[in-house]
Image (cartoon, rainbow, N blue to C red):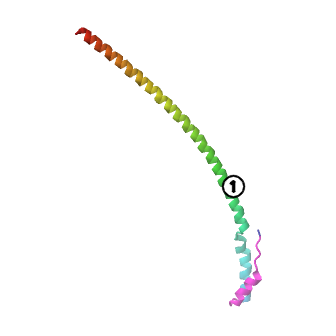
Amino acid sequence: MVLAFDTLGYAKRLRDDGVLEPQAEAHAEAARDYIMVELVTKRDLAAAIDRVDGMFEALRTEMELRFKHLDSRIDSLRNDVDAKIERLSLQLTIRLGALMVAGLGALAVILRLH
């Protein structure tokens, strides 16, 4: 966006403050040509903010999708771990039962021999 810059008013202000007219005019022209082109307007800032907001919204959406995917993977892994723990618990129960039967059988044999 082009900004209006009052070079005449700027040069007059410099002249009023003691700067010679040719220098004041040259300074005003240089300010218009080199400084004013680098200034950002409110509209420029609003457009940049809108672009950044859009980028953040896209990132937020992507992160939400990734977190949902990670949550489902974690739930799946948790279910797998729970199933493995349950299976190991059953195996330990069976082994303990087998040891108890073997121990009772051995005790019965020892008692019969006595």
Query: What residue type is disc 1 on?
Result: Gly
101 vs 10: above or below: above
From the viewer's perspective, is residue 44 above or below residue 103?
below
Magenta segment, which residues? 2-19
Would residue 82 appear left or right of 2 to someone viewing this image?
left
Quarter of the image holding residue 20?
bottom right
Q: Is residue 4 above or below residue 44?
A: below
Q: Residue at x 65, y 54 (%)?
A: 56
Left or right of 45: which side holds 103?
Answer: left
For the point 52% across and 31% down, the residue is 80
Residue at x-position 57% and y-position 41% = 71
Q: Quadrant of the C terminus?
A: top left
Which residue is painted at 66% across and 53% down in the image? Answer: 57
Residue 38 position in % (x across, y down)? 70, 70
> Percent x, y for residue 105?
32, 13
- Compared across the picture, whether 51 is left or right of 105 comes to right
Judge whether residue 82 can be spotted in this image. Answer: yes
Look at the image and say whether residue 10 sits in the magenta stretch: yes
Q: Position of residue 36 (x, y in %)?
A: 72, 74
Residue 33 within the magenta-colored segment of the rendering? no
Is residue 22 visible in the rendered structure shown here?
no
Spot the residue most to the top. 113
Residue topped by disc 1:
54
Q: Position of residue 75 (x, y in %)?
A: 55, 37
